[in-house]
Amino acid sequence: MATTLSPAQHEVLDLLRAADRERPEVAPELRDGLRARLDRELGAIAAGLAEPLFAGKAAIGRVLACEAHHLDEQATPFEWSLPTARGTVAHKAIQLSVARADRPAPLVLVDDALERLAGDPGERIADFLLALSSADRAELRSDVNGIVATFLELWPPLERSWQPQTESPRRAELCGGMVVLSGRVDLTLGAPRGNRAGRVVVDLKTGGRHAGHLDDLRFYALLDTLRVGVPPFSAVGYYLDSGTFTAEEMTESVLEAAVRRTVAAVTKLVELKLGLRSPSRTANAACRWCRLRPDCSAAVVDDPLAQEL
């Protein structure tokens, strides 16, 4: 029996299918050209590295926003909390929902995700989950249930023929392995056919839109192109809280922008790692929670009363 879709689910389905848009075909040498350019532009600075430098979307976004904030965040040991755990558990539950043939209740998926993550010694979050109090576990369970329920409510059932993949790792080793770009894509659908694009890359978000989200999507598209040789047809950022999305066709000009941004960020990361210069300070949205703010002359002042004085 055919599944009856809601208007929101139809909207997502239309976005993913994009039946009226022709899938572009790219030159076979695109991947080799992109890799050669990255190697060429990063080769000189990477030659000073004694060990590989790993760069993901978070480090790239931080260092381009404010170098001093990036170094401070990098030097601070990561600590799990309920807010940071929420995203990890939600993504695991959504991953399970895509792979299962039945349609279990959201809370069943959440409990399965919590059990699997806590029971896997290889998961960084395992110890945190095992040590949670009953109250904190219930709060986390409730919060994640809301995210998963929203995804299942807004997204149509993903057909096997769409070749869905969740939490797909992407990795590109450059400059003889001394620069490693990496990322993990929330959801991909479809696959290229020969040199013709056919994949859609999806980044699921909670909260509001941020200018850097589009750059994250372009970074994923670049990684995918370096991996298979054909860029995704489209990259989609889907905001679960509002049921809205942003989408961009991954043309060669968009990939060009991603390459320029990646080169700029990796160059900064290497310079700072090697101590070639002092970090700059730049006002940005992260000033609100940055630990350096009290003594930073560049920090944004977002207190309305302070702005009036």
Image (tube, grey):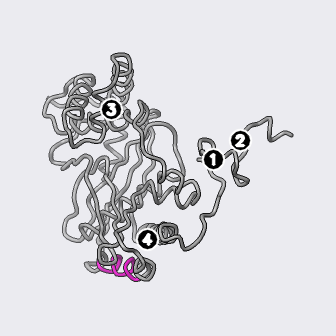
- Local packing at callout 4 (Cα closer than 10 Å; few below 14, some 14-19, many 20+) is some
Circle 2 residue: 302
Q: Which residue is depicted at the point 30% across and 29% down?
A: 129
Point out the tag, 1 or 4, that comes first from the N-terminus.
Answer: 4
Taking depth in this image into account, of 73 and 241 the one nearest to the observer is: 73
What is the residue that sits farthest to the right in this orientation? 309
- Please, is residue 133 above or below residue 28 in the view? above
The disc, 1 or 2, on the residue closer to the chain's N-terminal end is 1
Q: Which residue is mark 4?
A: 259
Question: In the displayed structure, would residue 199 be above or below residue 255?
Answer: above
With 300 as the anchor, is 31 left or right in this view?
left
Asked if the residues shown at circle 2 and circle 3 are in contact, with their CB atoms under 8 angstroms apart, the answer is: no
Secondary element under disc 3, as helix, strand or loop, is: helix
User: Please, what is the three-letter code of the amino acid marked with disc 4?
Assistant: Val
Look at 45% across and 39% down and name the residue there: 244
The quarter of the picture where residue 158 lies is top left
**From mark 1 to mark 4, how far is it between C-alphas?**
27 Å
Q: Is residue 143 above or below residue 74?
A: above
Is tag 3's residue or tag 4's residue first in the polypeptide sequence? 3
Q: Amino acid at mark 2?
A: Asp
Q: Please name the residue that numbered disc 1 is placed on.
A: 287
